Each structure stands twice: as C-alpha cells, then as structure tokens.
Image (spheres, rainbow, N blue to C red):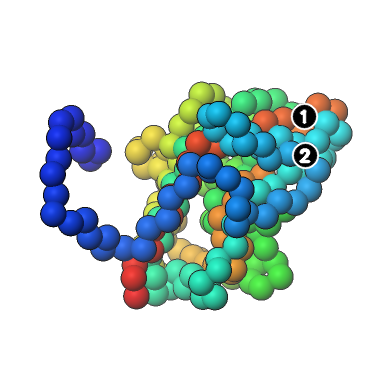
Amino acid sequence: GDPFFAGILRAKEIQFLRNFWYTSFPSKDGLLEAGTGTATLSIGPLTLQSGATTNNIKSLYGQDYTGEYIDTSSKDISFETGLKLVNTTSVEYVFGINMVAGVPDNSNLPNGISFEVITNKLYAVKYRDDGTRDATEIQATTPVGYHRYRVDVVAGVSIKYYVDGVLEHTYTTNLPAIIPAFPFGYSVKTTANAAKFMYIVYLSIETPFD
C-alpha cells in the first residue's frame, strides 16, 4: 500500500537500493523538444501546449545519457508521472517510455510503453520489437484533474499499468525487449484548430543498479 508518516524522522543514513531519478521540472535542462507549440515553466507544473492548427504535436522528452539502453528482458523499470490532461475533446495525449515527437522512436528499435488518450479514451499501450502496436482501453473517458500514472516492468514477465495506485491492466506476452536512448517523454496533439494543454507535475524513474 501507500505508507503515510506524519512527524519527525531522524536517520543516520539513507540508502538507495535502486537507481532513482526524480524531477519536478525546476528547469528544462537535459530535456529535448520537438514539434509545434511550447513547453513553459512557471510557478506550479510544467505546461506542454500544442500549436493551434489541426494535427500540431508538441513533445518533450529526455535522453538516456548513461550510454546504455534499458533491456527490459533482463532489467526491471518503473516509470511514474503526475499530470493533468486539460482538454477532453479534439486532442490526443501520449506519455511513457520511448517517446520522440509523440510516437515511438523508430531510429533504433520500434518499441515502447505508454499511456495514450485517443478519442477521449485512455489506453495502456505497448509496441512489440517488430513495431506492432498493442492497445487496451482502460478508461472509457479522458481522466480530468490531476492523477498519478505508473508503468511497472518486471523483466521478461509483465508490464503493469496503474492509475492513482490502482492496477488497470497487465500484459504478459509479446513484451518489448530493449528501450532505446530516448526513453521518457510526453506529447500533446490537437485534432482541431485550437491549442491543447497538459500540465506535468513530476516524473520519477527507477531501475536496478545492475
């Protein structure tokens, strides 16, 4: 479950048992942008905004600077983000692992793991190593307000999708093996002549040390 502690905690040391990256986006250093629109920092969440013309896409993503791809056949990974999907009509959202310009990065291997919103429905999506897209509807309407989205990969076993800590779907077959060097990102696509928005609060990533 989700533990809760209120009070004073004194510790001699803190040990991290896994690689852990966390950002609440105090800057955009180390992040790359693509498409038409803006990624704006202010007091509060980072705002990702598409352009105002039909099919404009704005993407924000991070590159893996360790020089190693994530081999999900042998290494677990957990991706979690807190965000708000502002618009619920004439918009498509994608956020997850292996994001470049709003679609899986095909320059290395055609695979990825993501949440996607299409025609107002929320999907758990994975792309196999051969590029085949598998999508399962997990919510019939676009979630409104702020929510936590998490994907847990158990190497070679399963991919689990959570919304606000509730398990929504599990894949156990045709799992992608290696996630390329542009792993983590977000995109907003407008399907009308109007700008669309996503508010991103934080991103956290966990992997084993070896």
102 sits left or right of 68 in the view:
right
Q: Residue 100, labelled with which disc? A: none
Q: Residues within 10 Å of mark 2 (few under 14, many from 20)?
A: many
Q: Are marks 1 and 2 in contact (CB under 8 Å)?
A: yes
Above or below for 60 versus 177: above
Quadrant occupied by the N terminus: top left
What is the three-letter code of the residue carrying label 1?
Ala
Question: Secondary structure under badge 2?
Answer: strand
Residue at (71% x, 51% y) in the render: 33
Give the residue number, with chain letter if any, for mark 2.
Answer: 37
**Considering depth in this image, is 130 or 30 the residue closer to the camera?**
30
Above or below for 120 versus 58: above
**For marks 1 and 2 on the same chain, the one whose residue lies earlier in the sequence:** 2
| Residue 92 visible in the shown view | no
Residue 187 percent coordinates (x, y): 67, 44
Q: Residue 42: name its quadrant.
A: top right
What is the three-letter code of the residue carrying label 2?
Gly
Residue at (34% x, 75% y) in the render: 210
Residue 50 percent coordinates (x, y): 75, 36
Give the residue number, with chain letter if any, for mark 1.
Answer: 195
| Residue 105 visible in the shown view | yes
Residue 19 percent coordinates (x, y): 36, 63
Q: Residue 179: name its quadrant.
A: bottom right
Residue 45 percent coordinates (x, y): 55, 33
- Point out the frontmost of discs 1 and 2: 2
